[in-house]
Image (cartoon, rainbow, N blue to C red):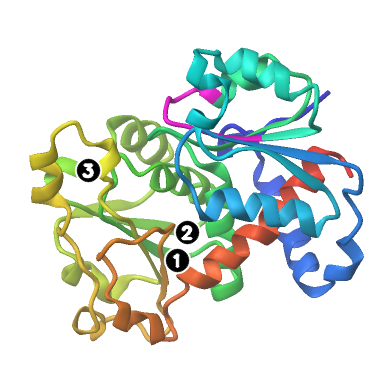
Amino acid sequence: MKKDLLNILDLTEGEINELIATAEDIIANPDAYAHRCDRKKLATLFYEPSTRTRLSFEAAMYELGGQVLGFASATSSSVAKGESVADTARTVACFADIIAMRHPKEGAPMVAAQNVDIPVINAGDGGHNHPTQTLTDLLTIKREKGRLDHMTVGLCGDLKFGRTVHSLITAMSRYEGVDFVLISPEELVIPENVRTDVLVRGNIPFVETRSLEEAMPKLDVLYMTRVQRERFFNEADYIRLKDSYILTRDKLTTAKSDLSILHPLPRVNEISVEIDRDPRACYFKQVLCGKYIRMALILKLLEV
């Protein structure tokens, strides 16, 4: 029976740990994986703009010896003619062995998965889920901290529309001893379903604050996010909130010496470029981890 990845909860904690272990083995022994996906094809169906996610999927498949086809914009496909997600997926399944889909509408990858017999990976659907970014985040944290349990994780910025935030909270809530500090303006707090269904129901310790400076000293991981213009209906609200949090060198003076700073990217100006040279900055390491964890995921879903 084929397996899809639509939500991080589609993977057990054991499966996540297995993927991380495979990714770390790929990092250590890349040549051993160079032909694992010979004659296999990945279709990247990206209805929304993407740099890191799409290119890391493509790089992952190429480094496994496979091939890539697909589109980077809905306007360059038959979607522009009105073709449905289901029909596009059925068509692409005639040519490919596995699909990675990004779509602005929540649930679109699920529709695709229900209509094809090949694995479908959700590469981001609206403000809902981004499970492969979460796997990327988990691999990065594991490599930086040596563990995924017993730590305090701060999430800062757009917690309302940030699909990476929702998925990361859901995933890390399964590890023992993880506390969350949720840092956002009032208008961009985490959705009620994440607060109730994940944190409260799971009895996960969390606090909400408006102050990054107040939270900083207790954090082991700081996950910065941008305020996403594309999720706002009102331009005035976006302009008012977009610079709510800007991480500068001054704001790190009270931070732990081994703090890990992550960001799913792209950044706009929420992390000053002066932080890039700080050894605690992990966001470009995070990008590279994305390729390796997607290599591991492709191998798992194709049962190679």
Asked if residue 102 is among those painted magenta in the image, a careful observer would answer: yes
Residue at the spot 76% in from the left edge and 45% down from the top edge:
298
Residue displayed at 65% across by 50% down: 57
- Report the residue at 66% width, 15% height from top: 114
Q: Which residues are magenta?
A: 100-108
Residue type of the residue flagged with mark 2: Gly
The 10 Å Cα crowd at callout 3, few under 14, some 14 to 19, many 20 or more, is many
Residues at badges 1 and 2 in contact (C-beta under 8 Å)? yes
Q: In the rendered image, which quarter is residue 27 located in?
A: bottom right
For marks 3 and 2, give the CA distance: 23 Å
Toward the viewer: 300 or 200? 300
Q: How many neighbours does mark 1 have within 10 angstroms: few (below 14), some (14-19), or many (20 or more)? A: some
| Closer mark to the observer between disc 1 and disc 2 | 1
Query: Residue 300: x percent and y percent?
Result: 79, 44
Q: Position of residue 175 (x, y in %)?
A: 54, 53
Q: Give left or right: position of 121 versus 74.
A: right
Residue 189: assigned label: 3
Residue hosting label 2? 177
Q: Vertically, is 76 above or below 94?
A: below
Name the amino acid type tagged 3. Answer: Val
Marks 1/2: CA distance?
6 Å
Q: Secondary structure at mark 3?
A: loop
Q: Which residue is mark 1?
A: 151
